[in-house]
Amino acid sequence: MLPLIVWLAAAFTSTDATRAEPAIAITDDFAGPHLDRSVWTTRQIGRTRYRIDDSTARSDDGRSLEITIRASDNGCVGDPKPCQRNEIRVVEDLLIPFGTDAWYGFSFRVDGYVDPNDSNRLVIGQWKEQSGGSPFVAQRFDDRVFRITVQDSECRAIIAEMPTGPGRPGGLLFLSSHRMQCTRAPEIKLTPANPADHILPNPYRAWVDMVYRIRGGRDGDGLVEVWANGECVVRAEGTIGNRDFGGPRQYFKFGVYRDKVAYLTRIHFDSFKRAASHREIDPDYTPCPWWD
């Protein structure tokens, strides 16, 4: 008979080696009356900063998740620049391996204030590698403009945005990440649904329905495809991820993450799904001919 300590070590090694990854599929309509703790963790949100709201909803059940951030909130321990954070994130047991080809669908709207002349960092919805780094895909709202960015290590690229007037960029715009300088062009190929532009709808005081296909890839095999309100928006291919933060798994989180400012912002989140195909999110899905 094996000594107890050897038997336990063998048992734990076997269990860890054969641990099954969680199923991709998750669905949450925030039907309430409380946040589903089997799906979401509240480790990065104040307990009075979220609630199930029965007065504003995208889904038929008449409820959505409301998240608020106020001037007094904080949230960036160890960050050299003060910031504020109120976000929910998928629980540890439901994280999937980085590089998984997964689809995400959700609806959101912004009902609180966002300064149109404030270039400070503001993220509402992001996908991150488990071990850290900038989000490899993010929804950004600096200057009250809805933009989607992807990350190639220290380089960040805007792949789609709201119309911002005649001077708005018509192609990829490369930016430096927070705390890092971009000294090269990101290895990303962009294919807009319409070759003329890659425009996002306005989420301010109006529901926007988003669908993402996301596959992180640090060796050039990354892929992000975006739909908004049922319309094809853009496909980005290439190096998508952070080489210095190569964690085994990835997670999605939703809420407000911003530099410290003095105004209140309120958002609503509804009809969340994570799935293995677009058709599981939208049964009426039609492929985008520009991308195939």
Image (spheres, helix red, strand yellow):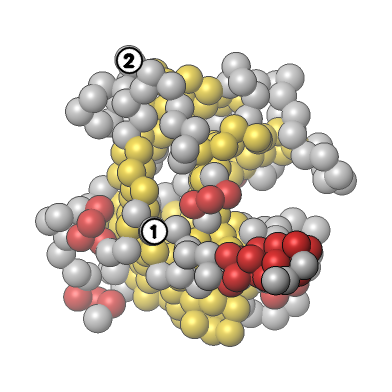
Q: Earlier in the sequence, mark 1 or mark 2?
A: 1
| Mark 1, other Cα within 10 Å: few <14 / some 14–19 / many ≥20 | few
Residue at horizontal 63%, vertical 39%? 257
Closest to the observer, 134 or 12: 12
Indicate the amino acid at tag 2: Ser
Residue at horizontal 54%, vertical 84%? 220
In this rendering, the answer to whether 214 lies above or below 59 is below
Residue 55, numbered label: 2
Where residue 64 sits, quadrant-wise, is top left
In this rendering, the answer to whether 105 lies above or below 202 is below
Q: Position of residue 44 (x, y in %)?
A: 65, 35
1 vs 2, front mark: 1
Looking at the rendered structure, the secondary structure element under dot 1 is loop
In this rendering, the answer to whether 265 lies above or below 15 is above
Which residue is at the far left?
284
Closest to the observer, 47 or 186: 47
Residue 279 located left or right of residue 95: left
